[in-house]
Amino acid sequence: MFRYNVLLAILMQFTFASKISFNYGIIGNMKTNDALVNLKDRSEVFNGDKIRINIGIIKNTNFYILYKDTENTYSLLYESSRNINDNKALDTLYFTALPWNTFEGSQGEETFYLINTYDELFDMKKLLARYDNAPMKAKNKLSKKIEKLLNSMDPDAVENISNLTNRLDKPIVGGVAFRGDDDNSLKPQSLIYECIGASGIAFQKIILNHK
């Protein structure tokens, strides 16, 4: 019985450790009416509209925002490596990963990959470093490798990774403003969604239609 209990405790600890989740909000400041709106997958944006991405992650995890523009060019917008010596009291860290940026240029799909992991993504960073310094012909080949790597993390492409996206009905305790004074208003710091992952990775792909 003692051995069984020890084995069960180890198994439960491993299962819990592999679970990971983060909160996010993609806030748009629309040029037409200067209003703050919640942007989600397949939302429409136009030249002059602004976007801001807010994140809440478990302390001592890694977070990345990879971006693919309308010309299918990749870039790493944000990277935060875990700091195991972080003495902050909160278990969750809240920050703005992408400050206000304005859409301009060609129309098409603006794609954002939000990735939260326990392990640092060294292979992805090396691949992106090669991509940044590569000539155009080599970039086309490397972009296919980047796409393949992203698909290996995407729960829509890989069956054994669980990923759910839910509307947060209530604010999370963390000292930040998640919404305005009522449920229909937003603030620049708002977090609206939760991405729940498994196997040590939470992955969310957001496409905005740039009209």
Image (tube, rainbow, N blue to C red):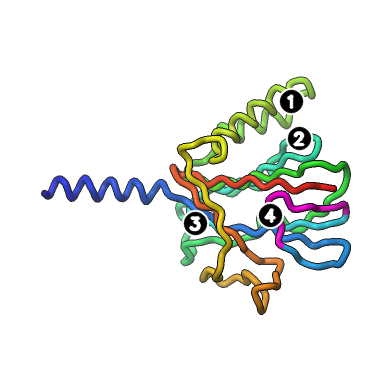
Task: Left or right? Give the position of 178 relative to 45.
Answer: left
Q: Taking 181 as reference, is 132 above or below it?
A: above
Which residue type carries mark 1?
Answer: Lys
Mark closer to the chain start, 4 or 2: 4
Most prominent secondary structure in the magenta stretch? loop
List the single residue furthest toward the left: 1
In the rendered image, which residue does mark 2 sit on?
73
Comparing marks 4 and 1, which lies closer to the viewer?
4
**Which residues make up the magenta segment?**
38-47
- Residue 58 is tagged as 3
Residue 165, x across and y down, in percent: 56, 54
Instruction: For mark 3, give the secondary structure.
Output: strand
Which of the two residues, 81 or 207, is positioned nearer the viewer here?
207
Residue, disc 4: 40
Q: Are marks 4 and 2 in contact (CB under 8 Å)?
A: no
- Mark closest to the chain's N terminus, 1 or 2: 2
Front-lying residue, 126 or 164 = 164
Q: Earlier in the sequence, mark 4 or mark 1?
A: 4
- Label 3: how many Cα within 10 Å (few below 14, some 14–19, many 20+): many
- Pick the front one: 201 or 82: 201
Asked which secondary structure carries label 2, the reply is loop
